[in-house]
């Protein structure tokens, strides 16, 4: 891939962001389609986020947002899709007439990842038999999961290390007509989804111990790592079907790609293969 004066800039913003495979995945797709663009990772602090977004808008850039900036970015973009506004979190942005537009492609990404994990109807719109979703965390990714749950009429059970944040999340969910409540200690759930950053480091504590789950048949970890995350490995050892966030990454990335390059069909197999190679390295 040759970078020249006309090369379009795309970026993923986060803190931390070195773990992100978005550049690897999107650059593989860009090469496959022969597009003149380059995707980079920009470590961006919370205080620098408004300045970085303003600069990207000024150069007609586009990109993605990861932890912990999804909710803040939703507030900064000049315009947003209905889904972005409904979630209250932005993970995808692009520039139109010098102004940033925000979207949320995590919601369809969650649906697709769960469809792969446990099956569903309607082309991935449903999740068979999963009526109770235990959501670990309360950030922007958790909001996307809650909206995905509401769309299939699932009950969201919320767990956080900070009880006040869990209660605030339930209040937010009610404002979006999402059925949710704070999870009781041993309340049964059909699927559990980790939306926290726990697992980015091998030494991180598990988001929840498998022995603390009741009736769970499947688990999705939004974190991804070489060799899969310790939580995914622990869940499988306990007999629970589990996968990490690589399928979510690919599907939300493909949806984002159509925003970056309207009219182009994202090469899903190329993107998936690039992620798989990176996670084997």
Image: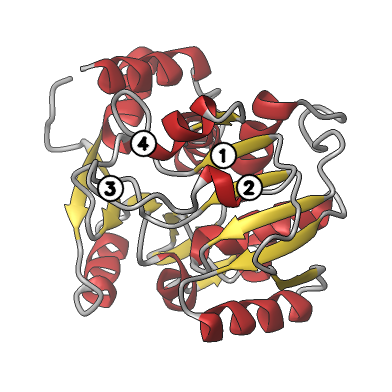
Is residue 244 found left or right of 122 in the rendered image?
A: left
Asked if the residue at tag 1 contacts the one at tag 2, i.e. Cβ–Cβ closer than 8 Å, the answer is: yes
- The residue singled out by tag 1 in the image is 220
How far apart marks 4 and 3 lie (CA) works out to: 28 Å
Compared to residue 102, the image places residue 237 above or below, namely above
**Viewer can see residue 235:** yes
**Where is mark 4, residue-wise?**
230
Residue 60, x across and y down, in percent: 32, 55
- Identify the residue shown where x is 82% and y is 73%: 177
Location of residue 66 by image quarter? bottom left
Q: Earlier in the sequence, mark 3 or mark 1?
A: 3
| Residue 106 in view in this figure | no
The residue at which mark 3 appears reads as: 11
Residue 225: percent from the left, percent from the top?
A: 32, 33
**Which is more foreground, mark 3 or mark 1?**
1
Using a 10 Å C-alpha cutoff, classify the residue at mark 1 as few (fewer than 14 neighbours), some (14 to 19) or many (20 or more). many
Give the crowd class for mark 3: few <14, some 14-19, many >=20 residues within 10 Å: many
The image shows residue 57 at horizontal and vertical percentages of 32, 63
Give the camera-side residue of 87 and 184: 184
Labelled pair 3, 1 in contact (Cβ < 8 Å) = no
């Amino acid at each position: 891939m040759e970078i020249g004066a006309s090369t379009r800039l795309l970026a993923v913003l986060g803190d931390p962001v070195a773990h992100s495979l978005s550049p690897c995945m999107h650059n593989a797709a860009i090469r496959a389609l022969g597009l003149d663009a380059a995707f980079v990772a920009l470590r961006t602090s919370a205080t620098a986020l408004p300045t970085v977004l303003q600069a990207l808008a000024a150069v007609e850039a586009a990109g993605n947002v990861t932890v912990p900036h999804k909710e803040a970015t939703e507030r900064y973009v000049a315009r947003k899709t209905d889904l972005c506004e409904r979630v209250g979190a932005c993970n995808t942005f692009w520039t139109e007439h010098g102004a940033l537009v925000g979207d949320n492609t995590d919601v369809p990404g969650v649906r697709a990842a769960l469809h792969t994990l446990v099956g569903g109807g309607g082309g991935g719109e449903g999740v068979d038999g999963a009526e109770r979703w235990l959501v670990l965390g309360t950030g922007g990714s958790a909001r996307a999961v809650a909206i995905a749950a509401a769309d299939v009429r699932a009950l969201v059970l919320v767990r956080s290390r900070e009880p006040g944040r869990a209660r605030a999340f339930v209040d937010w969910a009610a404002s979006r007509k999402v059925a949710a409540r704070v999870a009781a200690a041993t309340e049964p759930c059909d699927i559990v989804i980790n939306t926290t950053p726990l697992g980015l480091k091998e030494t991180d504590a598990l988001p929840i111990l498998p022995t603390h789950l009741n009736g769970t048949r499947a688990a999705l970890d939004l974190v991804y790592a070489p060799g899969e995350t310790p939580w995914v490995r622990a869940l499988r050892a306990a007999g629970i079907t589990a996968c990490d966030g690589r399928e979510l990454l690919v599907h939300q990335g493909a949806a984002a790609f159509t925003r970056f390059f309207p009219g182009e069909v994202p090469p899903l197999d190329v993107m998936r293969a690039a992620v798989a190679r990176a996670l084997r390295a």
